[in-house]
Image: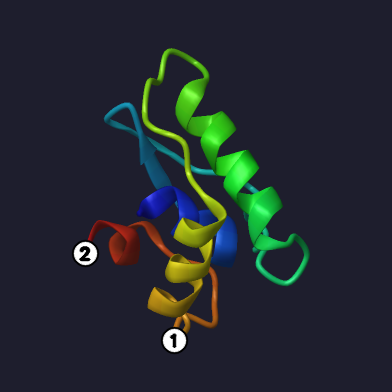
Amino acid sequence: MRVLAILLNGVTGPITVLGKPQTYSGNMVPWEATLPPKKIAAVASYIRAEWGNGAPEITEADVVAAKKEFASQTAPWTETQLLQ
């Protein structure tokens, strides 16, 4: 799940938003070492439910599973990596 990958490890470099390349001068920092899984789940659930989104809630168990799945990722993601 991309939202958890991004929240856990951050993202860097240009990304495409709504089909248009957008370059950000900063990077999104990783939150894995800062926030516990319960809070990351709350942030992900908020993102997925706001701004016209209607995706289901993310659970703490989802975050724990994502941490295991993405454990080998030690640097922020790039768009290319996230799209693979």
Amino acid type, label 2: Gln
The circle on residue 57 is: none
What residue is disc 1 on? 72
> Residue 84: which quarter of the image?
bottom left
All told, the count of numbered labels is 2
What residue is disc 2 on? 84
Q: Residue furthest right?
A: 34
State which quarter of the image contains the N terminus: bottom left
Amino acid type, label 1: Ser
The residue lying at 54 percent from left, 83 percent from top is: 74
Q: Residues within 10 Å of mark 1 (few under 14, many from 20)?
A: few
Report how far apart the C-alphas of labels 2 and 1 lie in the structure. Answer: 15 Å
Q: Position of residue 4 (x, y in %)?
A: 48, 55
Is residue 41 visible in the rendered structure shown here? Answer: yes
Q: Position of residue 57 (x, y in %)?
A: 46, 36
Q: Residues within 10 Å of mark 2 (few under 14, many from 20)?
A: few
Q: Is 29 above or below relative to 15?
A: below
The residue lying at 36 percent from left, 57 percent from top is: 79
